[in-house]
Amino acid sequence: MTDRIAGIPRTALERLLADERARFDAAHPRSRALAARTAAHWLHGVPMHWMGDWGTPVTLFLQAARGAELADVDGNTYADFCLGDTGAMFGHSPEPVARALEAQGRRGFTAMLPTEDAAVAGELLAARFGLPFWQMAQTASDANRAVLRWARAITGRKSLLVFEHCYHGAVDDAFVRLEEGRTVNRPGLVGQAADLGLHTRCVEFNDLAALEAALRTREVACVLAEPVMTNAGMVLPEPGFLEALRELTRRHRTLLAIDETHTLSTGPGGYTGVARLEPDFFVAGKAIAGGFPCAVYGFTAELEERIRGMLAAKPAGHSGIGTTLAGNALAVAALRACLEQVMTPRAYEHMLAMAERLEDGLERLIEQESLPWHVQRVGARLEVGFTRTPPRTGRQSVGALPPLLPDVIRLYLLNRGLVITPFHNMMLLSPATPAAAVDRLAVGWSQCVADLTIAARS
Protein backbone atom coordinates (compact mmCIF):
# COMPACT_ATOMS: atom_id res chain seq x y z
CA MET A 1 0.00 0.00 0.00
CA THR A 2 1.49 3.31 -1.10
CA ASP A 3 1.92 6.12 1.44
CA ARG A 4 1.10 8.83 -1.11
CA ILE A 5 -1.65 9.00 -3.73
CA ALA A 6 -1.23 11.51 -6.57
CA GLY A 7 1.07 13.53 -4.32
CA ILE A 8 -1.24 13.43 -1.26
CA PRO A 9 -0.48 11.36 1.87
CA ARG A 10 -2.92 8.46 2.20
CA THR A 11 -3.47 9.24 5.89
CA ALA A 12 -4.58 12.77 5.00
CA LEU A 13 -7.09 11.42 2.49
CA GLU A 14 -8.50 8.91 4.95
CA ARG A 15 -8.79 11.54 7.70
CA LEU A 16 -10.52 14.10 5.49
CA LEU A 17 -12.85 11.48 4.00
CA ALA A 18 -14.00 10.45 7.48
CA ASP A 19 -14.64 14.10 8.40
CA GLU A 20 -16.61 14.73 5.20
CA ARG A 21 -18.75 11.62 5.65
CA ALA A 22 -19.71 12.80 9.14
CA ARG A 23 -20.50 16.26 7.76
CA PHE A 24 -22.74 14.78 5.07
CA ASP A 25 -24.60 12.63 7.61
CA ALA A 26 -25.37 15.63 9.79
CA ALA A 27 -26.78 17.64 6.86
CA HIS A 28 -29.02 14.97 5.29
CA PRO A 29 -31.44 13.37 7.78
CA ARG A 30 -34.33 13.42 5.31
CA SER A 31 -32.27 11.71 2.63
CA ARG A 32 -31.30 9.05 5.16
CA ALA A 33 -34.95 8.42 6.02
CA LEU A 34 -35.92 8.15 2.35
CA ALA A 35 -32.98 5.83 1.67
CA ALA A 36 -34.28 3.47 4.36
CA ARG A 37 -37.78 3.63 2.88
CA THR A 38 -36.79 3.02 -0.76
CA ALA A 39 -34.45 0.17 0.17
CA ALA A 40 -37.53 -1.97 0.81
CA HIS A 41 -38.55 -2.03 -2.87
CA TRP A 42 -35.71 -0.84 -5.12
CA LEU A 43 -32.39 -2.52 -5.87
CA HIS A 44 -29.81 -0.62 -3.80
CA GLY A 45 -32.68 1.66 -2.79
CA VAL A 46 -32.78 3.53 -6.12
CA PRO A 47 -34.86 3.27 -9.35
CA MET A 48 -31.68 2.70 -11.40
CA HIS A 49 -28.70 1.15 -9.65
CA TRP A 50 -26.15 3.72 -10.91
CA MET A 51 -27.93 6.32 -8.79
CA GLY A 52 -26.22 4.72 -5.81
CA ASP A 53 -22.70 5.31 -7.17
CA TRP A 54 -22.10 8.78 -5.73
CA GLY A 55 -19.92 7.63 -2.86
CA THR A 56 -22.09 9.40 -0.28
CA PRO A 57 -22.88 7.73 3.07
CA VAL A 58 -26.51 7.46 1.90
CA THR A 59 -28.14 8.37 -1.40
CA LEU A 60 -28.82 12.07 -1.88
CA PHE A 61 -32.50 12.59 -2.72
CA LEU A 62 -33.49 15.34 -5.14
CA GLN A 63 -36.25 17.86 -4.46
CA ALA A 64 -35.88 20.01 -7.59
CA ALA A 65 -33.55 20.83 -10.47
CA ARG A 66 -33.67 24.07 -12.42
CA GLY A 67 -31.14 25.72 -14.69
CA ALA A 68 -27.75 24.80 -13.24
CA GLU A 69 -28.93 24.34 -9.65
CA LEU A 70 -30.19 21.45 -7.55
CA ALA A 71 -32.08 21.33 -4.26
CA ASP A 72 -32.27 18.23 -2.09
CA VAL A 73 -35.03 17.07 0.25
CA ASP A 74 -33.14 18.46 3.26
CA GLY A 75 -33.23 22.00 1.88
CA ASN A 76 -29.60 22.11 0.72
CA THR A 77 -28.89 23.79 -2.60
CA TYR A 78 -26.09 23.07 -5.06
CA ALA A 79 -24.39 24.51 -8.12
CA ASP A 80 -24.62 21.59 -10.52
CA PHE A 81 -21.61 20.74 -12.69
CA CYS A 82 -22.68 17.13 -13.23
CA LEU A 83 -25.88 18.08 -15.05
CA GLY A 84 -27.35 14.60 -15.04
CA ASP A 85 -24.11 13.11 -16.40
CA THR A 86 -24.68 15.15 -19.60
CA GLY A 87 -28.45 14.73 -19.94
CA ALA A 88 -28.95 18.27 -18.66
CA MET A 89 -25.97 19.75 -20.53
CA PHE A 90 -28.10 22.70 -21.57
CA GLY A 91 -29.55 23.19 -18.09
CA HIS A 92 -32.33 21.46 -16.20
CA SER A 93 -35.74 21.91 -17.82
CA PRO A 94 -34.80 24.52 -20.45
CA GLU A 95 -37.81 26.80 -20.76
CA PRO A 96 -38.37 26.34 -24.53
CA VAL A 97 -38.30 22.55 -24.12
CA ALA A 98 -40.61 22.66 -21.09
CA ARG A 99 -43.11 24.80 -23.05
CA ALA A 100 -42.96 22.49 -26.06
CA LEU A 101 -43.54 19.42 -23.88
CA GLU A 102 -46.49 21.05 -22.14
CA ALA A 103 -48.10 22.08 -25.43
CA GLN A 104 -47.58 18.73 -27.13
CA GLY A 105 -48.64 16.88 -23.99
CA ARG A 106 -52.10 18.39 -24.37
CA ARG A 107 -52.21 17.25 -28.01
CA GLY A 108 -51.04 13.69 -27.39
CA PHE A 109 -47.94 11.85 -26.20
CA THR A 110 -47.53 9.15 -28.81
CA ALA A 111 -49.47 7.73 -31.76
CA MET A 112 -46.77 6.06 -33.93
CA LEU A 113 -47.32 8.88 -36.44
CA PRO A 114 -45.14 11.90 -37.26
CA THR A 115 -46.08 15.50 -36.53
CA GLU A 116 -45.17 18.74 -38.26
CA ASP A 117 -42.33 19.07 -35.74
CA ALA A 118 -40.65 16.12 -37.49
CA ALA A 119 -40.24 18.11 -40.72
CA VAL A 120 -38.65 21.04 -38.90
CA ALA A 121 -36.45 18.87 -36.66
CA GLY A 122 -35.11 16.97 -39.66
CA GLU A 123 -34.17 20.20 -41.40
CA LEU A 124 -32.48 21.48 -38.24
CA LEU A 125 -30.47 18.28 -37.75
CA ALA A 126 -29.28 18.26 -41.36
CA ALA A 127 -28.25 21.92 -41.25
CA ARG A 128 -26.47 21.59 -37.91
CA PHE A 129 -24.59 18.32 -38.33
CA GLY A 130 -24.17 18.07 -42.11
CA LEU A 131 -25.84 14.71 -42.70
CA PRO A 132 -29.02 14.68 -44.79
CA PHE A 133 -30.94 11.69 -43.35
CA TRP A 134 -31.98 10.93 -39.78
CA GLN A 135 -33.80 8.52 -37.50
CA MET A 136 -34.81 8.74 -33.84
CA ALA A 137 -34.43 6.49 -30.84
CA GLN A 138 -35.09 6.94 -27.12
CA THR A 139 -31.48 6.58 -25.99
CA ALA A 140 -28.03 6.75 -27.54
CA SER A 141 -27.68 3.05 -26.69
CA ASP A 142 -30.66 2.32 -28.96
CA ALA A 143 -29.28 4.60 -31.67
CA ASN A 144 -25.88 2.89 -31.59
CA ARG A 145 -27.52 -0.54 -31.78
CA ALA A 146 -29.45 0.56 -34.86
CA VAL A 147 -26.34 1.99 -36.51
CA LEU A 148 -24.46 -1.27 -36.02
CA ARG A 149 -27.33 -3.30 -37.47
CA TRP A 150 -27.59 -1.05 -40.53
CA ALA A 151 -23.81 -1.15 -41.02
CA ARG A 152 -23.64 -4.93 -40.89
CA ALA A 153 -26.66 -5.29 -43.16
CA ILE A 154 -25.50 -2.99 -45.92
CA THR A 155 -21.82 -4.05 -45.90
CA GLY A 156 -22.40 -7.78 -45.48
CA ARG A 157 -19.65 -7.80 -42.85
CA LYS A 158 -20.13 -9.07 -39.31
CA SER A 159 -17.34 -7.41 -37.33
CA LEU A 160 -17.31 -4.15 -35.40
CA LEU A 161 -14.29 -2.20 -34.17
CA VAL A 162 -14.23 -0.15 -30.98
CA PHE A 163 -11.50 1.42 -28.87
CA GLU A 164 -10.28 0.12 -25.53
CA HIS A 165 -12.34 1.58 -22.63
CA CYS A 166 -14.82 3.18 -25.03
CA TYR A 167 -18.32 4.12 -23.93
CA HIS A 168 -21.37 3.66 -26.15
CA GLY A 169 -24.10 3.20 -23.59
CA ALA A 170 -25.54 -0.28 -23.12
CA VAL A 171 -24.48 -1.67 -26.51
CA ASP A 172 -23.45 -5.28 -25.91
CA ASP A 173 -20.97 -5.36 -28.82
CA ALA A 174 -18.90 -2.59 -27.20
CA PHE A 175 -18.49 -4.24 -23.77
CA VAL A 176 -15.07 -5.65 -24.55
CA ARG A 177 -11.48 -5.29 -23.40
CA LEU A 178 -8.11 -5.87 -25.01
CA GLU A 179 -6.05 -8.53 -23.21
CA GLU A 180 -2.71 -9.68 -24.61
CA GLY A 181 -3.79 -8.80 -28.11
CA ARG A 182 -7.16 -10.55 -27.84
CA THR A 183 -10.63 -9.00 -27.63
CA VAL A 184 -12.53 -10.45 -24.65
CA ASN A 185 -15.69 -9.67 -22.72
CA ARG A 186 -15.31 -6.79 -20.27
CA PRO A 187 -14.91 -7.96 -16.66
CA GLY A 188 -17.99 -7.12 -14.62
CA LEU A 189 -20.42 -7.51 -17.52
CA VAL A 190 -23.66 -8.97 -16.17
CA GLY A 191 -25.48 -11.90 -17.74
CA GLN A 192 -23.68 -12.00 -21.09
CA ALA A 193 -23.57 -15.53 -22.50
CA ALA A 194 -22.02 -14.69 -25.88
CA ASP A 195 -18.32 -14.34 -26.62
CA LEU A 196 -18.33 -10.75 -27.86
CA GLY A 197 -14.80 -11.14 -29.20
CA LEU A 198 -16.14 -13.27 -32.06
CA HIS A 199 -17.49 -10.21 -33.88
CA THR A 200 -15.88 -7.21 -32.14
CA ARG A 201 -12.31 -6.04 -32.58
CA CYS A 202 -10.78 -3.82 -29.91
CA VAL A 203 -7.70 -1.61 -30.30
CA GLU A 204 -6.19 1.19 -28.27
CA PHE A 205 -7.24 4.77 -28.97
CA ASN A 206 -4.50 6.71 -30.79
CA ASP A 207 -2.83 3.45 -31.97
CA LEU A 208 -2.88 3.87 -35.75
CA ALA A 209 -0.78 0.77 -36.46
CA ALA A 210 -3.21 -1.48 -34.58
CA LEU A 211 -6.18 0.24 -36.23
CA GLU A 212 -4.79 -0.27 -39.73
CA ALA A 213 -3.95 -3.90 -39.03
CA ALA A 214 -7.50 -4.56 -37.85
CA LEU A 215 -9.10 -2.86 -40.87
CA ARG A 216 -6.76 -4.39 -43.42
CA THR A 217 -8.64 -7.70 -43.30
CA ARG A 218 -11.71 -6.00 -44.85
CA GLU A 219 -13.94 -7.81 -42.32
CA VAL A 220 -14.96 -4.79 -40.22
CA ALA A 221 -18.36 -3.35 -41.08
CA CYS A 222 -18.10 -0.27 -38.87
CA VAL A 223 -15.80 1.59 -36.52
CA LEU A 224 -17.87 2.99 -33.65
CA ALA A 225 -15.91 5.75 -31.95
CA GLU A 226 -16.11 8.68 -29.61
CA PRO A 227 -14.00 11.48 -31.11
CA VAL A 228 -12.68 12.03 -27.57
CA MET A 229 -12.75 9.25 -25.01
CA THR A 230 -14.81 10.45 -22.06
CA ASN A 231 -15.68 7.51 -19.85
CA ALA A 232 -12.18 6.39 -18.90
CA GLY A 233 -11.17 9.79 -17.74
CA MET A 234 -10.67 12.08 -20.72
CA VAL A 235 -8.36 11.01 -23.54
CA LEU A 236 -7.90 13.42 -26.44
CA PRO A 237 -7.02 12.32 -29.98
CA GLU A 238 -3.43 12.94 -30.93
CA PRO A 239 -2.86 15.32 -33.87
CA GLY A 240 -3.81 13.58 -37.09
CA PHE A 241 -5.41 10.53 -35.46
CA LEU A 242 -9.01 11.26 -36.41
CA GLU A 243 -8.04 12.29 -39.93
CA ALA A 244 -6.16 9.00 -40.31
CA LEU A 245 -9.15 7.12 -38.89
CA ARG A 246 -11.35 8.60 -41.59
CA GLU A 247 -8.83 7.88 -44.35
CA LEU A 248 -8.28 4.28 -43.22
CA THR A 249 -11.97 3.49 -42.96
CA ARG A 250 -12.57 4.81 -46.46
CA ARG A 251 -9.59 2.92 -47.86
CA HIS A 252 -10.84 -0.37 -46.42
CA ARG A 253 -14.54 0.31 -47.18
CA THR A 254 -15.44 0.36 -43.49
CA LEU A 255 -18.17 2.67 -42.27
CA LEU A 256 -17.35 5.25 -39.59
CA ALA A 257 -19.87 6.03 -36.84
CA ILE A 258 -19.08 8.93 -34.52
CA ASP A 259 -20.87 8.85 -31.17
CA GLU A 260 -21.17 12.46 -29.98
CA THR A 261 -23.39 11.85 -26.96
CA HIS A 262 -20.74 13.33 -24.65
CA THR A 263 -18.84 15.54 -27.08
CA LEU A 264 -21.80 17.71 -28.06
CA SER A 265 -20.14 19.98 -25.49
CA THR A 266 -17.56 20.93 -28.15
CA GLY A 267 -19.66 23.34 -30.19
CA PRO A 268 -22.98 23.76 -32.04
CA GLY A 269 -22.04 21.01 -34.52
CA GLY A 270 -20.33 18.82 -31.94
CA TYR A 271 -16.73 17.68 -32.27
CA THR A 272 -17.60 16.53 -35.79
CA GLY A 273 -18.33 20.08 -36.84
CA VAL A 274 -15.19 21.55 -35.27
CA ALA A 275 -12.86 18.84 -36.62
CA ARG A 276 -14.73 18.27 -39.92
CA LEU A 277 -14.78 14.52 -39.42
CA GLU A 278 -17.24 13.56 -42.22
CA PRO A 279 -18.62 10.38 -40.60
CA ASP A 280 -20.96 7.96 -42.34
CA PHE A 281 -23.13 7.82 -39.20
CA PHE A 282 -23.51 10.40 -36.43
CA VAL A 283 -25.08 9.56 -33.06
CA ALA A 284 -26.24 11.88 -30.28
CA GLY A 285 -28.38 11.29 -27.22
CA LYS A 286 -28.90 12.45 -23.62
CA ALA A 287 -28.83 16.23 -24.15
CA ILE A 288 -30.05 16.48 -27.76
CA ALA A 289 -33.67 17.12 -26.67
CA GLY A 290 -32.86 19.12 -23.55
CA GLY A 291 -32.73 16.05 -21.29
CA PHE A 292 -36.01 14.52 -22.42
CA PRO A 293 -35.47 10.82 -23.40
CA CYS A 294 -34.42 11.08 -27.02
CA ALA A 295 -31.56 10.21 -29.36
CA VAL A 296 -30.87 10.64 -33.05
CA TYR A 297 -28.63 9.10 -35.64
CA GLY A 298 -27.84 10.61 -39.01
CA PHE A 299 -26.33 9.14 -42.16
CA THR A 300 -25.19 10.07 -45.64
CA ALA A 301 -27.27 10.09 -48.82
CA GLU A 302 -25.25 7.14 -50.12
CA LEU A 303 -26.13 5.09 -47.04
CA GLU A 304 -29.79 6.11 -47.29
CA GLU A 305 -29.87 4.69 -50.82
CA ARG A 306 -28.19 1.46 -49.72
CA ILE A 307 -30.54 1.10 -46.75
CA ARG A 308 -33.60 1.57 -48.95
CA GLY A 309 -32.29 -1.04 -51.37
CA MET A 310 -31.58 -3.51 -48.59
CA LEU A 311 -35.05 -3.03 -47.07
CA ALA A 312 -36.71 -3.50 -50.44
CA ALA A 313 -34.89 -6.77 -50.98
CA LYS A 314 -35.38 -8.34 -47.57
CA PRO A 315 -38.34 -10.58 -46.63
CA ALA A 316 -41.24 -8.95 -44.80
CA GLY A 317 -40.92 -9.03 -41.01
CA HIS A 318 -39.52 -7.19 -38.04
CA SER A 319 -36.16 -5.56 -38.75
CA GLY A 320 -35.06 -5.58 -35.11
CA ILE A 321 -34.51 -1.82 -35.33
CA GLY A 322 -36.64 0.64 -33.40
CA THR A 323 -39.07 0.61 -30.49
CA THR A 324 -42.72 1.63 -30.22
CA LEU A 325 -42.03 4.90 -28.44
CA ALA A 326 -39.08 5.98 -30.61
CA GLY A 327 -39.94 9.21 -32.41
CA ASN A 328 -42.99 9.84 -30.24
CA ALA A 329 -44.62 13.25 -30.54
CA LEU A 330 -43.34 14.48 -27.18
CA ALA A 331 -39.73 13.61 -28.02
CA VAL A 332 -39.91 15.25 -31.45
CA ALA A 333 -41.37 18.42 -29.90
CA ALA A 334 -38.55 18.50 -27.34
CA LEU A 335 -35.93 17.84 -30.02
CA ARG A 336 -37.19 20.67 -32.22
CA ALA A 337 -37.31 23.13 -29.32
CA CYS A 338 -33.83 22.24 -28.14
CA LEU A 339 -32.25 22.50 -31.59
CA GLU A 340 -34.12 25.69 -32.45
CA GLN A 341 -34.02 27.66 -29.20
CA VAL A 342 -31.61 26.08 -26.69
CA MET A 343 -28.52 24.79 -28.53
CA THR A 344 -27.79 28.20 -29.97
CA PRO A 345 -24.39 29.73 -30.87
CA ARG A 346 -24.91 32.20 -28.02
CA ALA A 347 -25.50 29.35 -25.57
CA TYR A 348 -22.28 27.68 -26.65
CA GLU A 349 -20.35 30.95 -26.38
CA HIS A 350 -21.34 31.17 -22.72
CA MET A 351 -20.64 27.49 -22.02
CA LEU A 352 -17.19 27.66 -23.60
CA ALA A 353 -16.30 30.91 -21.84
CA MET A 354 -17.26 29.42 -18.46
CA ALA A 355 -15.27 26.26 -19.20
CA GLU A 356 -12.20 28.32 -20.05
CA ARG A 357 -12.66 30.28 -16.83
CA LEU A 358 -12.79 27.07 -14.78
CA GLU A 359 -9.86 25.56 -16.66
CA ASP A 360 -7.75 28.64 -15.89
CA GLY A 361 -8.63 28.46 -12.20
CA LEU A 362 -7.80 24.76 -11.92
CA GLU A 363 -4.54 25.12 -13.82
CA ARG A 364 -3.49 27.98 -11.52
CA LEU A 365 -4.18 25.78 -8.51
CA ILE A 366 -2.12 22.92 -9.96
CA GLU A 367 0.77 25.27 -10.70
CA GLN A 368 0.66 27.12 -7.37
CA GLU A 369 0.56 23.93 -5.31
CA SER A 370 3.02 22.05 -7.56
CA LEU A 371 0.54 19.19 -7.88
CA PRO A 372 1.33 16.27 -10.24
CA TRP A 373 -2.04 16.75 -11.96
CA HIS A 374 -3.34 18.05 -15.29
CA VAL A 375 -6.57 19.41 -16.81
CA GLN A 376 -8.19 18.11 -20.01
CA ARG A 377 -11.00 20.01 -21.72
CA VAL A 378 -13.31 19.36 -24.66
CA GLY A 379 -15.50 22.40 -25.20
CA ALA A 380 -17.68 22.83 -22.12
CA ARG A 381 -16.56 19.51 -20.56
CA LEU A 382 -13.39 19.17 -18.50
CA GLU A 383 -11.70 16.86 -16.03
CA VAL A 384 -8.78 16.91 -13.65
CA GLY A 385 -6.38 14.02 -14.16
CA PHE A 386 -4.04 12.92 -11.41
CA THR A 387 -0.85 12.54 -13.48
CA ARG A 388 1.54 15.21 -14.74
CA THR A 389 1.13 14.09 -18.36
CA PRO A 390 -2.27 13.43 -19.97
CA PRO A 391 -2.82 9.80 -20.99
CA ARG A 392 -2.91 8.84 -24.66
CA THR A 393 -4.96 5.65 -24.32
CA GLY A 394 -7.94 4.49 -22.32
CA ARG A 395 -5.83 1.86 -20.58
CA GLN A 396 -3.35 4.49 -19.41
CA SER A 397 -6.15 6.74 -18.20
CA VAL A 398 -7.93 4.02 -16.21
CA GLY A 399 -4.64 2.79 -14.78
CA ALA A 400 -3.79 6.29 -13.57
CA LEU A 401 -7.06 6.85 -11.67
CA PRO A 402 -6.02 6.81 -8.01
CA PRO A 403 -7.97 5.36 -5.09
CA LEU A 404 -9.52 7.59 -2.39
CA LEU A 405 -8.58 10.97 -3.86
CA PRO A 406 -11.52 11.32 -6.31
CA ASP A 407 -13.93 10.18 -3.57
CA VAL A 408 -12.59 12.77 -1.15
CA ILE A 409 -12.79 15.59 -3.68
CA ARG A 410 -16.35 14.79 -4.80
CA LEU A 411 -17.72 14.51 -1.27
CA TYR A 412 -15.83 17.60 -0.11
CA LEU A 413 -17.30 19.66 -2.96
CA LEU A 414 -20.79 18.21 -2.45
CA ASN A 415 -20.73 19.20 1.21
CA ARG A 416 -20.05 22.76 0.07
CA GLY A 417 -22.89 22.90 -2.42
CA LEU A 418 -20.92 21.90 -5.53
CA VAL A 419 -21.85 18.82 -7.58
CA ILE A 420 -19.50 17.10 -10.03
CA THR A 421 -19.99 13.67 -11.61
CA PRO A 422 -19.60 10.54 -9.50
CA PHE A 423 -17.59 9.03 -12.37
CA HIS A 424 -14.04 10.37 -12.43
CA ASN A 425 -14.06 14.16 -11.93
CA MET A 426 -15.94 15.38 -14.96
CA MET A 427 -17.32 18.91 -14.81
CA LEU A 428 -19.77 20.32 -17.34
CA LEU A 429 -20.82 23.91 -17.95
CA SER A 430 -24.30 24.83 -19.18
CA PRO A 431 -25.83 27.98 -20.69
CA ALA A 432 -27.40 28.55 -17.25
CA THR A 433 -24.11 28.31 -15.31
CA PRO A 434 -23.16 31.73 -13.85
CA ALA A 435 -19.58 32.94 -13.51
CA ALA A 436 -20.02 33.16 -9.73
CA ALA A 437 -20.72 29.43 -9.56
CA VAL A 438 -17.63 28.68 -11.66
CA ASP A 439 -15.51 30.74 -9.29
CA ARG A 440 -17.07 28.95 -6.31
CA LEU A 441 -16.07 25.61 -7.81
CA ALA A 442 -12.49 26.72 -8.40
CA VAL A 443 -12.32 27.94 -4.81
CA GLY A 444 -13.82 24.65 -3.61
CA TRP A 445 -11.03 22.69 -5.28
CA SER A 446 -8.48 25.05 -3.75
CA GLN A 447 -9.97 24.71 -0.26
CA CYS A 448 -9.99 20.93 -0.60
CA VAL A 449 -6.28 20.91 -1.43
CA ALA A 450 -5.62 23.28 1.49
CA ASP A 451 -7.54 21.06 3.92
CA LEU A 452 -5.67 18.01 2.67
CA THR A 453 -2.46 19.85 3.38
CA ILE A 454 -3.63 20.62 6.92
CA ALA A 455 -4.70 16.99 7.41
CA ALA A 456 -1.27 15.84 6.27
CA ARG A 457 0.41 17.98 8.93
CA SER A 458 -1.84 16.97 11.83
Image (cartoon, grey):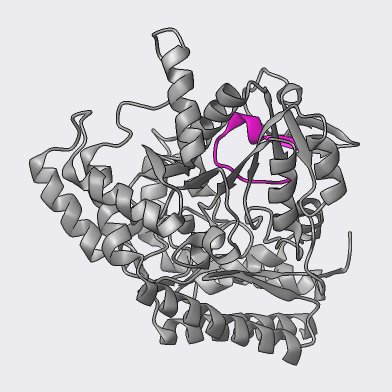
Compared across the picture, whether 126 is left or right of 440 comes to left
Picture coordinates of residue 139, whole percent (x, y): 43, 40
Name the residue rendered at 63%, 56% in the picture: 230
* Residue closest to the far bottom: 368
225 versus 368 height, above or below = above
**Figure quadrant of the C terminus:** bottom right
448 versus 88 height, above or below = below
163 versus 406 height, above or below = above
Picture coordinates of residue 356, whole percent (x, y): 55, 82
Residue 44 at least partly seen: no
Compared across the picture, whether 337 is left or right of 13 comes to left
Q: Which residues are magenta?
A: 164-177
By secondary structure, the bulk of the magenta-drawn segment is best described as: loop
Picture coordinates of residue 79, whole percent (x, y): 42, 74
Picture coordinates of residue 218, whole percent (x, y): 77, 29
Name the residue rendered at 62%, 71% in the picture: 377
Q: Nearer the viewer, residue 303 or 426?
A: 303
Number of labels in the image equals 0
Q: Nearer the viewer, residue 60 or 125?
A: 125
**Figure quadrant of the N terminus:** bottom right
Residue 223 at least partly seen: yes
| Magenta stretch: includes residue 408 | no
